[in-house]
Amino acid sequence: MIAGLIVAAGLAAGEAPAPVPQETVVYELRRARIAGEAGDRTLQGRTLDDLATKYPDEPAVLLAAMAFHRDVALDADGARALRLRFFESMARPGRAVPVSLMRDIARDPKSSPEDLLRLVDVLVAQPGAGSDGVARLRLRVALLDRLGRSDQMLAALEYLTTVDADPSLVDRLLRTYRDAGRWSDVLRATGRIQGGDAGFEVGWWRLEALSTLGRSDELLRDAEVLIGRFRQAGLLEPHVAERFFPFVFRLADSGRRETAERLTALLVAAGPDLENVKKLRAMLFGTPESRMAYLNAAASASLASEDPDWIRDEAHARLLAQEFGIAHDLYRRLSAMPGAAARLTPPDWFNYGLASIETGAWGDAEAAMSRVLEKDPRNARALGHRARARIMQERLTEGIADAESALAIDPKAKQACYAMYLAMQKIGSSEKAAEWLARFKAP
């Protein structure tokens, strides 16, 4: 069965830079597969070993023989020798190994970190082109993430977003930079993405970064471009205009009233008939408390709304503004709406989980992060966050298991380190808790 899958992978369309095995090789691999399905392990092993002797540089043959020795013959030494020959074959000049074969090695639970690093080296040396190149780059990102090589993974991921327009990749890149407090990298990455090209509006990310960095003049310029884009597309609805309000209020509360008034004027000019925009100028002369009360009232309107897009936009804006209680209530409302939950993406569920953690809604946090892990079971951050949620619900065994899984993927996973710190505290092991807290705080 394994050999059959490998043959199919080696002959898959679009895998042309690798030479197709000779007709005899294909025939013999199929013969080995049939022997295995008939229960004749002796014939299966002899056929694969003969092939590996005759064709010592053919990756499909070596991988099929290695799988047999590892899984059927339980011959660890034989499998190790064939694995070594496979890697040597991949590294030979002029050799272009199909990405499907490299995925088989990457998915093999017996692959060591050293094996995975050699795969990364091969992927760097054989980047491919077109769709094959994108597939190789995706595999490289996944391997670097699994190995905990965060800086290399981010560099590869950023390059991947230049050749693959998948919105989830761009979203993952920007969220990773944001969670690490790398706002300058958010600006640099979004600077090369035109508005809307990523499948979602990256302009909000730029405003958040510029606001956090205190670069008010640039924030005003970017906001003007974004407002103009929404106005031209006929999308400046009340709930969209309201997403600019937290930036206006932050400017006013940080002493940049003139810039806040100019941003307000841009909104008034773009949406003169919007009732909430008409109220905005008056709110500039109010207190921070009154402005927060307005935002809370707006959130209540979103909670009462039946428009899932409106609710999701508002929830995301509140999360960015660190108004976690409101964000949590909005996401919870969205997840309960008939049909809306099915439209939520893994990033939406992750945001819901974050808002739940910040508000201590541990059951909601666990459920939301579990939805993320259904689609991405190797998401170390989601595993770490779910670990914390389970530990806070006194389910220490499950929580520690999640944290250990996250650390196996990324030994520096901050969320998992913090979860282990909490677990050790609850167990009463102060020394271990201090160790995990130090790992959490380490750069």
Image (cartoon, grey):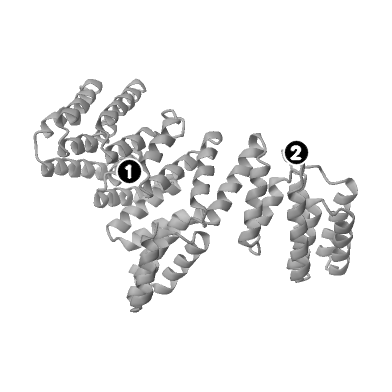
Q: Image quadrant for the N terminus?
A: bottom right
Q: Residue furthest left?
A: 286
The spot of residue 64 in percent (x, y) is 78, 58
Relative to the observer, which residue lies in front, 106 or 382? Answer: 106
Tell me: residue 183, above or below residue 411.
above
* Residue 1 can be seen in this image: no
User: Marks 1 and 2, Cα distance to the nearest angstrom?
Assistant: 43 Å
Q: Left or right: 385 with respect to 278?
A: right
Tell me: residue 393, above or below residue 226.
below
Residue 16 tag number = 2
User: How busy is the neighbourhood of tag 1: few (under 14 within 10 Å), some, or many (20 plus)?
Assistant: many
The spot of residue 418 in percent (x, y) is 37, 64
Say which amino acid is labelled 2: Ala
Residue 316 tag number = 1
Residue 110 tag number = none
Q: Left or right: 330 with respect to 411?
A: left
Q: Determine the secondary structure under disc 2.
A: loop
The spot of residue 116 in percent (x, y) is 63, 56
User: How busy is the neighbourhood of tag 2: few (under 14 within 10 Å), some, or many (20 plus)?
Assistant: some
Residue under the image location 43 percent in, 30 percent down: 196
Quarter residue 422 falls in:
bottom left
Relative to the observer, which residue lies in front, 385 or 127? Answer: 127
- Which label lies toward us, 1 or 2? 2
Q: Left or right: 405 with respect to 392?
A: right
Q: Determine the secondary structure under disc 1.
A: helix
User: Do callouts 1 and 2 mark residues in contact (Cβ within 8 Å)?
Assistant: no
Q: Which mark is first along the chain, 2 or 1? A: 2
Quarter residue 46 falls in:
bottom right
Q: Image quadrant for the C terminus?
A: bottom left
Q: How many marks?
A: 2
